[in-house]
Amino acid sequence: MRRFYVPFSLLTLLSGCTLMDGSQYTQKTVNAIESMESNVYSRLDSMEVTMNEQTAYIANLEKELADIAEDMEQIRQQNNQAKEPEKVALAVAPQTKAENTYKGSIVLGSREWVVLDSVKQGFEARVDTGAATSSLNAIDIQEFERNGKNWARFHLSDKNIAPEDRKWIEAPIIRHIKIRQASSDGLDRRPVIELWIKLGDLHEKTLFTLADRSHMTHPILLGREFFKDIALVDVSKDFIQSTKPNK
C-alpha cells in the first residue's frame, strides 16, 4: 500500500490562507453592517427633521385659522350692530303716518271718531273750524243738584244708535251761556259741561255746550277751543287720527 506524505510546511501555508480569508470576510461584514446602521440613523434623523418641520407648519396653520375665525366673528358682530338701527326704523315707521302730523302739530280730518269716557261709547264727530266752542246733540236734558253742585243728565242723540240703547250721561255744570236764536228774539239758556274724550292718541278734557241739535247730522261738534294749539284741520280728508268702526 502506497502512502502519501504532505510536507508540514505546506499544511502550515494552507492553514494561514484559510485564516486570512475568514478574517477579511468578517471585517467586510462588520463594515457593511456599520454602513447600514449609518444609513438608517441618517434616514431617521432626516425623518425627524421633516416631522418637526411638518409639526411647525401645522401649528402655524392652526394659528392662522384661529386668527381668521376671530376676524370673522368681529365682522359678524359689526354687521349685526350695523343692522340694528334698520330694525328699529322698520318697527317705528308704521306707527306714525306722514299725514298725521304737520310741523309738530296733529292733523285732524273734517270728521273723526270720538269716544266719551263716561259711557265708553264712540260717536262720529264733525270738526268745525267755524265754531268757537264744542257742542253735543243733547236731548232729555235734566238739571239737578249733587253735593251742593249743579249737574246735568241727558241722552246723546245719534241716528246710528237706537233710542233704547242710549245711555244716560251725567256731568257737573261748569256754567250757563245764553244764545240768541235766529228764529226768535229771545235768548236760549244752555248748560256747559266738561267731559273726557278720546280721539286717536288724544285724551282731553273738553267743554261742551248742551243743545238739541237733532237737525244736524253729527251728534258731536268739535270747535276751535278743542283743537287750538294742538292740532290742524285738513277739511279735504276724514278720519285721519281715528278709524270709523264698521257698522
Image (spheres, rainbow, N blue to C red):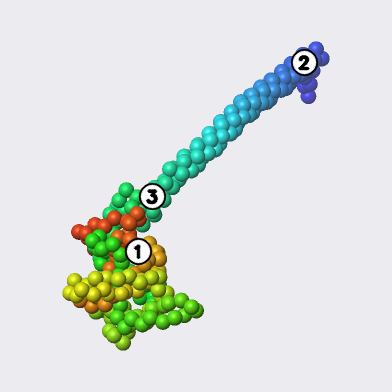
Of residues 132 and 81, which is closer to you in this image? 132
Of circles 3 and 1, which is in front?
Answer: 1
> Of callouts 2 and 3, which one flags the residue occurring earlier in the amino acid sequence?
2
Q: Give how far across and how far down residue 107 sits, in percent.
A: 29, 56
Residue that lies at the very extreme toward the bottom in this rendered image:
164
Q: Give how far across and how far down residue 139 sits, in percent.
A: 30, 81
> Of callouts 3 and 1, which one flags the residue occurring earlier in the amino acid sequence?
3
Residue identifier under label 1: 200
Of circles 2 and 3, which is in front?
Answer: 3
Residue identifier under label 2: 16
Residue identifier under label 3: 89
Q: Residue at x 27, y 70 (%)?
A: 179
Up the image or down, 117 lies above or below 237; here it is below
Q: CA distance from mark 3 to mark 1?
A: 22 Å
Q: Residue at x 27, y 75 (%)?
A: 188
Dot 2 falls on a residue whose secondary structure is helix
Dot 1 falls on a residue whose secondary structure is loop
Is residue 31 found left or right of 154 in the rendered image? Answer: right
Is residue 190 found left or right of 18 in the rendered image? Answer: left
Q: Residues within 10 Å of mark 2 (few under 14, many from 20)?
A: few
The three-letter amino acid code for the residue at tag 1 is Gly
Q: Residues within 10 Å of mark 3 (few under 14, many from 20)?
A: few
Asked whether the residues under the numbered discs 2 and 3 touch, taking CB atoms below 8 Å apart as contact, a structural biologist would say no
Asked whether the residues under the numbered discs 3 and 1 touch, taking CB atoms below 8 Å apart as contact, a structural biologist would say no
Q: Give residue 111's quadrant in the image.
A: bottom left
Residue 15: in sight, yes or no?
yes
Of residues 221 and 70, which is closer to you in this image? 221
Residue 122: in sight, yes or no?
no
The three-letter amino acid code for the residue at tag 2 is Gly
The three-letter amino acid code for the residue at tag 3 is Ala
Locate the C terminus and report the quarter of the image it occupies.
bottom left
